[in-house]
């Protein structure tokens, strides 16, 4: 209990912190034994009442938002697959308009012409097969002759055989330099094509 005689010696104006105390703590007098704890005012307002929302409405909103995002993703993927147009490879519009006039009808071939073409194709296929077989036989003969020569060399001298099968390091790596089909032009900045950027901008 507090000493009432001590409390009467102090007025309300003399109540001040004498020493460093924790927040919201004021002492009476010079001793730290007499302390009063005063709570600071709380500025608050009553909490707003939450509105009850139907779960079906919330689910419908989430579905619409998800569908919208998926649609944007599909649109971006579709635009990503489109290549940049090249003016040199596009057909002029006036030629497309004259396509009906420029298109030639397919000629009707007679039975004799069809038979002649079929025989010609068979002769060409037979010629190409004979050419392929002759090329393979020639490669086989060359490889067999090389194998026989190496075998004879191995019988004569094993050192010469090892030197013969060693790769020629002067040919590896092989590099050449010479004129190209289109010589480069110094300081030429190749154009990137003319196009209009029509891609949509999406805000984050």
Image: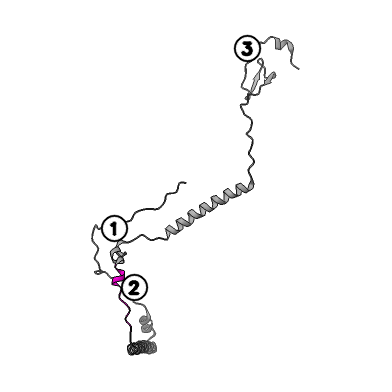
Q: Which mark is residue 172?
A: 2
Q: Which residue is mark 1?
A: 191
Q: Earlier in the sequence, mark 1 or mark 3?
A: 3
Mark 1 surroundings: few (<14), some (14-19) or many (≥20) residues within 10 A: few
Read off the magenta span. 98-108
**Alpha carbons under labels 1 and 3: distance apart:** 87 Å
Asked which secondary structure carries label 2, the reply is loop
Q: Which of pointers 2 and 3 indicates the residue nearer the eye?
A: 3
Q: Quadrant of residue 155?
A: bottom left
Q: Position of residue 60 (x, y in %)?
A: 59, 50
Asked which secondary structure carries label 1, the reply is loop
Q: Residue at coordinates 25% horizontally, 67% vertically from top-left?
A: 182
Question: Does residue 149 show up?
Answer: no
Q: Earlier in the sequence, mark 2 or mark 1?
A: 2
Q: Position of residue 189 (x, y in %)?
A: 27, 57
Q: Residue at coordinates 46% horizontally, 58% vertically from top-left?
A: 77
Taking the image as shown, residue 136 lies to the left or right of residue 92, namely right
Q: Residue at coordinates 45% horizontally, 55% vertically from top-left?
A: 76
């Amino acid at each position: 209990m507090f000493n009432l005689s001590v409390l009467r010696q102090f007025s309300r104006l003399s109540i001040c912190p004498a020493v460093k105390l924790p927040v919201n703590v004021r002492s009476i007098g010079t001793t730290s034994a007499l302390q009063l704890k005063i709570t600071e005012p709380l500025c608050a307002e009553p909490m707003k009442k939450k509105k009850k929302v139907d779960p079906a409405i919330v689910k419908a909103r989430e579905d619409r938002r998800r569908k919208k995002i998926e649609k944007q993703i599909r649109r971006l993927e579709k635009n990503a697959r489109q290549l940049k147009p090249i003016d040199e490879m596009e057909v002029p519009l006036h030629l497309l308009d004259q396509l009906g006039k420029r298109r030639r009808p397919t000629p009707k071939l007679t039975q004799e012409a069809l038979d002649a073409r079929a025989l010609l194709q068979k002769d060409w296929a037979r010629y190409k097969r004979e050419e392929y077989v002759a090329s393979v036989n020639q490669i086989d003969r060359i490889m067999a002759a090389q194998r026989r020569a190496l075998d004879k060399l191995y019988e004569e001298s094993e050192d010469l055989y090892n030197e013969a099968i060693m790769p020629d390091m002067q040919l590896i790596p092989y590099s050449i330099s010479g004129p190209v089909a289109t010589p480069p032009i110094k300081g030429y900045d190749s154009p990137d094509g003319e196009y209009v950027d029509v891609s949509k901008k999406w805000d984050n």
